[in-house]
Amino acid sequence: MQPVDLIRRLAPSADPVDLAEDYAYPEQGRWLRANMVSSLDGAATRDDRSGGLGGAADRLVFSTLRGLADAIVVGAGTVRAEEYGPVRPGEGWDRLRAGRPAVPPLAIVSRGLALDFDAPVFTETGARTIVLTTESAAPARLRAARERADVIVAGRDRLDFGAAADALAERGHTRLLCEGGPGVLAQVAAAGLLDELCLTLSPLLVAGAGPRVLHGPAMAVAAELRLAHVLESESFLLLRYARGSR
Ligand SMILES: NC(=O)c1ccc[n+]([C@@H]2O[C@H](COP(=O)([O-])OP(=O)(O)OC[C@H]3O[C@@H](n4cnc5c(N)ncnc54)[C@H](OP(=O)(O)O)[C@@H]3O)[C@@H](O)[C@H]2O)c1
C-alpha cells in the first residue's frame, strides 16, 4: 500500500502512514484484533448503528483491516443492525491478500440463528460464511445454517469463544479480526482472547444510552493493553492498543 495523505501519524513517530505496515499482523501464531469506533463521550452507537460515528479515515482502516484478516468474527446483533452484506475486495487488497482467497469469510456468532440464510451475506459471498454457534441451537435452524454456511459448534448454551477461535485456527484462520459488536467483544475480552484493540475515537458527542465498545459484566481482571500507535485524520484519532510490546 502507498503512503496515505488523508491520515498522519502522531506517535510513536511522524513517519508517513502505510496502513498495511502499520496494521501488519505478527508473522506467527494466532492474533485476535478488534476494530471499533467510539464517540468522544464513549458511545459505540449513534441511532443504533456505528456508521454515524465514522469518517473517511475510519472507513479506510476498516477496509485495510478486513484485507489483512483471515476471518472476520462478528456478532449476529451487528449483522442484523448494520445489515451486513458479503465482504467485497477493497483497494490494494491484491497485495494484502497475496496467496490467500480474495476475501476473508465472515464468522457470525449466533445462538438463536435468527438469521436470513437466503440473504446475500450467505449466498453471494466470495468466501463461504462461517456460523459460530452452540449445542443448544434449534436443530431446524442448525440444518438451515449448514445449507448455507460452514458451522462451528462450540459450547453448550453460550459460545465457547476460546474453542471457536481454536477451531478457526485449525481451518488456517489465525489472523482474526473482530468487528464487534459490544456484546461479543466483551466476551472475547473476558475470555482473555483480545490481543489488540483498534479504536477510532470520533470527534462527536452524542450522549444517549448507546453501549460502550465492550458491553457485558465487569471483568474480574481488567485487561491492560499498551499504546502501539496514534494516527490522526480530520479530528478523528485512530488508536492501536496491543498486548505485550507490539
Ligand atoms: N462502535 C462500533 O465499532 C460497533 C461495532 C459493531 C457493532 N456496533 C453496534 O453494536 C450494536 C450491536 O451490538 P450487540 O452487542 O447488540 O450485538 P453483537 O455483539 O453484534 O451480537 C450479539 C449477538 O451475538 C450472539 N451471541 C453473543 N454472545 C453469544 C454467545 N456467548 N453464544 C452464542 N451467541 C452469542 C447472539 O446472537 P443471537 O441473538 O442470534 O443468538 C447475540 O444476540 C449495533 O447497534 C451495532 O451498530 C458498534
Image (tube, rainbow, N blue to C red):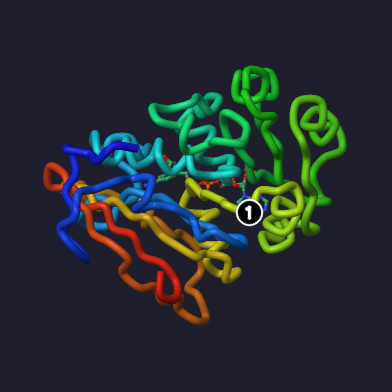
Above/below status of 118 relative to 76: above
**What residue lies at 78% left-to-right and 59% top-to-bottom?**
155
Type of residue at label 1? Thr
**What residue lies at 22% left-to-right and 53% top-to-bottom?**
231
**What residue lies at 57% left-to-right and 71% top-to-bottom?**
192
Left or right of 74? Residue 128 is right
Residue 27, percent from left and from top:
54, 59
**What residue lies at 87% left-to-right and 38% top-to-bottom?**
139
Residue 17, percent from left and from top:
24, 48
- Along the viewing direction, whichever of 30 and 59 lies nearer the viewer: 30
Left or right of 8? Residue 163 is right
Classify mark 1: residues with Cα within 10 Å, few (<14), some (14-19) or many (20+).
many
Residue 52, percent from left and from top:
28, 35
In which quadrant is the N terminus drawn? Answer: top left
Residue 216, percent from left and from top:
50, 63
Q: Which residue is mark 1?
A: 174
- Along the viewing direction, whichever of 79 and 34 lies nearer the viewer: 34
In which quadrant is the C terminus drawn? Answer: bottom left
- Along the viewing direction, whichever of 153 and 6 lies nearer the viewer: 6
- Along the viewing direction, whichever of 61 and 155 lies nearer the viewer: 61
Number of numbered tags placed on the structure image: 1
**Disc 1 element:** loop
Above/below status of 130 relative to 240: above
